[in-house]
Image (cartoon, rainbow, N blue to C red):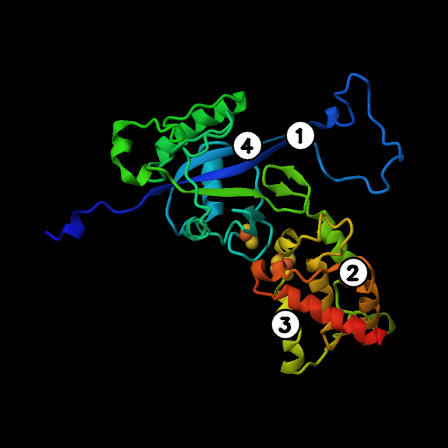
């Protein structure tokens, strides 16, 4: 028999997800000071822009699970939540790169959970030289490591329930602790379980964390809303019957000027990549500029001057430093940095 046919199939193999955890302080504790001298007050008075950032406990936690290279990081987190820790919080909706609700940071890069595969992100870690193994850094005592094999759903579910109970008590133990190298003899012989690669998953940078991997993206939507992200056509419906159909004709060339921009799913990945943006408190942010550009480039829109006025401010296009990290990460393939640069050119043209 062919030696290749005797060989064990290479999968399932294991991967460790090193997940950022954050538990906000309960509402009743907010505003209380831990200082025995009472609440501290700023000598400059109350801040004019109250911070959206929450206080609470944060830590990282390792979960080692069986995974195939084609599994997405979202699949892995769902498995963890189903079988190990039902309290793990993350956001998602469509599961295939269309809704933009699941932007996080993976190995330090903003991206979508549902399009990031285990194979790609463990490979990326190899290529970056940043590939790490559990065992190299035992981490804090709060890290928990558990192996769940997806091929045995019943065992996994049972083990998960047991571990979920442990999690609630804050003192977990796992059936097999890979972190300290203790394994059963079966697993010790199984090369697939040795030193699983690590994928780090954290919240989207630049936004206040609500819990674990869920961030508050309202600042981004507030910024987008401020730029009137809707078409204002030449025909004012208020002067005609509102039930009348309004048809705005366009040539294919005119459509091409904004078509790609209308693919933006407002995921916030560009904002999370931008070193200038921080929660929408100052710089308007690349997502809002893309939304503005989408209508500025639309031949049917009549608000072009008003839109350019709105972004022609210190916190508008002028704040962009042309780092262009936003272009690298956009999951819809929009060259965000280039679009912002074109807006800068349009604003300068008006000033000339
Ligand atoms: S421009 Fe790209 S990265 Fe930015 S919000 Fe839109 S889809 Fe997401
Ligand atoms: S879950 Fe909708 S884009 Fe990822």
Which one is earlier in the sequence, the residue at label 2 or at label 1? 1
The image shows residue 342, relative to residue 79, as above or below, that is below
**Badge number at residue 87:** 4
Residue 165 on image: x %, y %: 49, 23
The picture places residue 161, in percent across and down from the top left corner, at: 44, 27
Quadrant for ligand 1? bottom right
Establish if 196 lies above or below 120. above
Viewer-side residue, 345 vs 66? 345
Which of discs 2 and 4 lies nearer the camera? The answer is 2
Query: Spatial distance from mark 2 to mark 4, Cα to Cα?
Result: 39 Å
Pointer 2 residue: 316
Instruction: Kindly give the residue lying farthest to the top in the view shown.
Output: 36
Task: Give the labeled residue for mark 1.
Answer: 56
Q: Is residue 7 left or right of residue 207?
A: left
Sequence-wise, which precedes: disc 2 or disc 3?
3
Label 2 C-beta lies within 8 Å of the nearest ligand 1 atom: no
**Residue pushed farthest left?**
1
Q: For the residue labelled by badge 4, is the local secondary structure a helix, a strand or a loop?
A: loop
**In the displayed structure image, the side of residue 130 where residue 319 appears, left or right:** right
> What kind of element bears circle 3?
loop
Q: Which residue is mark 3?
A: 259
In 3D space, how far apart are the residues under numbered discs 1 and 4 (Cα atoms)?
16 Å
SS for callout 2: loop
* Mark 1 Cβ inside 8 Å of ligand 2: no
- Image quarter (top left, top right, bottom left or bottom right) of the C terminus: bottom right
Q: Earlier in the sequence, mark 4 or mark 3?
A: 4
Between residue 86 and residue 207, name the one nearer to us: 207
Q: Are marks 2 and 1 in contact (CB under 8 Å)?
A: no
Q: Quadrant of residue 14?
A: top left
**Residue 265 showing in the rendered view:** no
């Amino acid at each position: 028999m062919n030696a290749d046919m005797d060989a064990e199939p290479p999968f399932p193999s294991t991967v460790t997800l090193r997940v950022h955890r954050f538990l906000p302080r309960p509402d009743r504790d907010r505003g209380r000071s831990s200082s025995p001298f009472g609440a501290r007050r700023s000598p400059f008075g109350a801040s004019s822009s109250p911070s959206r950032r929450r206080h609470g406990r944060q830590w990282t936690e390792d979960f080692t699970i069986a995974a195939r290279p084609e599994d997405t990081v979202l699949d892995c987190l769902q498995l963890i939540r189903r079988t190990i820790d039902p309290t793990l919080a993350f956001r998602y909706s469509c599961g295939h790169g269309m809704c933009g609700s699941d932007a996080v940071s993976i190995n330090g890069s903003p991206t979508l959970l549902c399009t990031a595969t285990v194979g790609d992100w463990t490979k990326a870690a190899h290529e970056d030289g940043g590939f790490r193994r559990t065992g190299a850094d035992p981490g804090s005592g709060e890290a928990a490591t558990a192996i769940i094999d997806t091929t045995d759903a019943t065992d996994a579910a049972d083990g998960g329930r047991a571990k979920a109970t442990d999690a609630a008590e804050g003192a977990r133990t796992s059936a097999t602790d890979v972190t300290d190298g203790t394994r059963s003899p079966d697993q010790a012989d199984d090369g697939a379980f040795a030193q699983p690669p690590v994928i780090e998953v954290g919240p989207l940078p630049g936004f206040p964390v609500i819990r674990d991997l869920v961030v508050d993206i309202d600042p981004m939507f507030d910024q987008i809303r401020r730029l009137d992200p809707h078409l204002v056509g030449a025909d004012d419906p208020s002067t005609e019957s509102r039930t009348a159909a309004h048809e705005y004709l366009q040539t294919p060339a005119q459509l091409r000027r904004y078509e790609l921009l209308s693919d933006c799913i407002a995921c916030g990945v560009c904002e999370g990549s931008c070193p200038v943006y921080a929660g929408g408190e100052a710089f308007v942010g690349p997502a809002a500029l893309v939304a503005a550009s989408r209508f500025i480039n639309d031949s049917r829109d009549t608000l072009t001057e008003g839109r350019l006025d709105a972004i022609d401010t210190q916190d508008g296009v002028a704040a962009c430093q042309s780092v262009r990290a936003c272009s690298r990460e956009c999951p819809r393939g929009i060259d965000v940095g280039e679009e912002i640069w074109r807006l800068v050119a349009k604003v300068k043209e008006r000033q000339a």
